[in-house]
Structures are given as structure tokens and as C-alpha cells.
Amino acid sequence: MSRTLDDFVREALTEVIEIPAAEASQLLREDSGWHFLDVREPDEFAEARIPGARNSPRGFLEVRADLEHEKRDPWLSDRSRKLLLYCGGGNRSALAARTLQQMGFVEVLSLAGGFKAWLEAGLPTDT
């Protein structure tokens, strides 16, 4: 029996650890080695961004997200980075988390609720 993309996503979703905006903000303030990785669609990029996301790759999955991705984006060659996915969970976070784990990143979290949740929590933005 062949596996479908839905099977893959369902499995991957069980591995995505989502954290609330306040917790994400605390991780970044502590300067503990966590970095945002922007995995939104290009048309979702907001004018105001989350502090700490400015220097992260944007639209990670819009480039062919495979194990050779770091050849196109050297930022991803440092496997010691702890990654916080800048996305609202769901399928995209699951696929990104699975890909990043396959690339050798051990610590991958996802921002629960994405940018909208960040704004609703009243956290600062980087304009």
C-alpha cells in the first residue's frame, strides 16, 4: 500500500511542538541560540515582522525544501541553530519541521498561531 502526502503530513504533525507567542518571545529575549525561520507563503509576508525574524530565510518551503537546501541558502548550513518556525502551525509547519529534522536540526519548534497570535499577545514588532 503506497503512502500519500496526507499520510506524511499526519505523521509529521505529531512531531511539531507548538509554543505560544509569549514563550517564543521569551526564548528570543534570552538570546539562547533560538532563531526564527520564516516558512510562510510569499503573499503572507507582513510589513511588520517579529523581532529576530529579520535575518532569517524567508519562504523556506517556496524553494525546493530538500536536504540540499543549504546549498541555496547558507544560513541553513549551521545545524547548531535552534529553530522556531514563523508560521501558524498546520501542514506547512509539519512539512518544514520534518524537512529540518531530516537536515539534522535537532531542536525545531513552531510559533502557535503565527504572526496573528504574536500581534494579539501585544508583543513588539519590527517595522
Image (cartoon, rainbow, N blue to C red):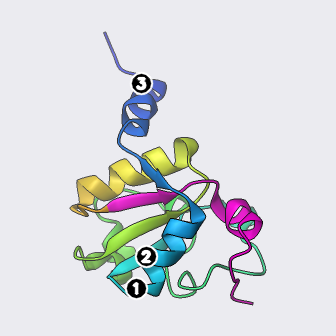
Q: Residue 32's quadrant in the figure?
A: bottom left
Instruction: Label 1, secondary structure: give it.
Output: loop
Q: Are marks 2 and 1 in contact (CB under 8 Å)?
A: yes
> Which mark sits nearer the N-terminus, 2 or 3?
3
Label for residue 30?
A: 1
- The crowd level at tag 2 (other Cα within 10 Å; few <14, some 14-19, many 20+) is some
Query: Residue 27 bears which disc, if any?
Result: 2
Drawn side of residue 53 relative to residue 46, left or right? left
The x and y percentages for residue 42 are 69, 66
On the rendered structure, is 13 left or right of 54? left
* Disc number for residue 7: 3
The residue segment tinted magenta is 108-127
* Residue 84 image position (x, y, % from top left): 44, 67
Task: Name the disc covering residue 44, or none.
Answer: none
Q: Is residue 22 above or below residue 56?
A: above
Which element type, helix, strand or loop, lies under badge 2?
helix
Q: Say whether residue 125 is visible.
A: yes
Q: Residue at x 35, y 67 (%)?
A: 69
Q: Which residue is nearer to you in this view: 88 or 22?
A: 22
- Residue count near mark 3 (Cα–Cα under 10 Å), binned few <14, some 14–19, many ≥20: few
Q: Residue furthest top?
A: 1
Query: Which structural element holds mark 3?
Result: helix
Q: How many marks?
A: 3
